Amino acid sequence: MNGYGQFCAVARALDVVGARWTLLIVREMLSGPVTFGDIRRGIPRIPPATLSSRLRALRTAGLVDVSDRRYRLTDAGLTLAPIVRELARWGMTTESTALSEDDFDTAALTWDMQRRVDVDALPGHTVVLALEFTDRPPRDRYFWLHLSKTNVNLCRQDTGAPVDLWLTAPTAEVTQWWLGDLTWSQLQRQPGVTVHGDRAVQRQMQHWFLRYAFTRSALAQTSSA
């Protein structure tokens, strides 16, 4: 049997969204339509066949539709947003979900950074931010963000464009800043963290990113709304 076979509403809901990866796929679509590749970049460890299977199940359940190869939540799918937020709130406040070494993924982290840029806060010219994660192997160590008001690109290869700001740091510290556990100033004071580049750009950078969608402060705002 694939389902729980119970009349309980919780069991029936889990029959639809309880499979591994499913709510993370929903999370990826909460910010708007995404391609198959976008979802994989947001959830790098999901096998492609599993992603295809989960998307089919969500479409069959009427929670997701697809147009022009872009997946989006239906009205029914959007009603899962409060559930995802409450799971995030629980995950941020309970010791049983504390971060472990296996949770640090530079590909997922930088992809989230790429899609959480406040383009209105960017300067009028293109800025290149280079990130070096000092504790990662070469394939997951270097990333470049090309930021402008009209386009935001994440690169894993150096394009040769002049770099305006270099951030060199261990993965855990950058992740803690992204999650809202460290301020930009606190991040810069952490052991092993260095920032090189124009000082004016260094001061502005903290305002370019909206950071993680489910920081403690963001969740507090939704609970008080």
Image: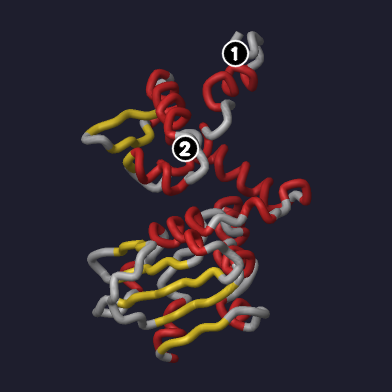
Looking at the picture, tell me which residue is in the foreground, 32 or 43: 43
Residue type marked 2 = Ile
Using the rendered view, name the quadrant where residue 186 is placed.
Answer: bottom right
Image location (x, y in percent) of residue 24: 52, 39
Question: For numbered disc 1, what is the local secondary structure?
Answer: loop
Of the numbered discs 2 and 1, the one sitting upstream in the chain is 1
In the picture of the structure, the residue carrying the numbered disc 1 is 3
- Compared to 52, does 32 lie above or below? below
Q: Which mark is residue 218?
A: none
Disc 2 and disc 1 in contact, CB within 8 angstroms: no
User: In the rendered image, which quarter is residue 34 located in?
Assistant: top left
Residue 81 in view in this figure: yes
Amino acid type shown at disc 1: Gly
Mark 1, Cα crowd under 10 Å, few <14 / some 14-19 / many 20+, is few
- Residue 7 position, x and y percent, is 64, 10
Q: Is residue 77 left or right of residue 169?
A: left
Residue under the point 59% across and 61% down: 179
Q: Position of residue 17 (x, y in %)?
A: 54, 27
Of residue 148 and residue 43, the one placed in the foreground of this image is 43
Indicate the position of residue 185 as horizontal and vertical percent values.
58, 82
Residue tagged 2:
25
Name the foreground residue: 69 vs 211. 69
The Cα atoms of the two marked residues, 2 and 1, are separated by 20 Å
Quarter of the image holding residue 187? bottom right
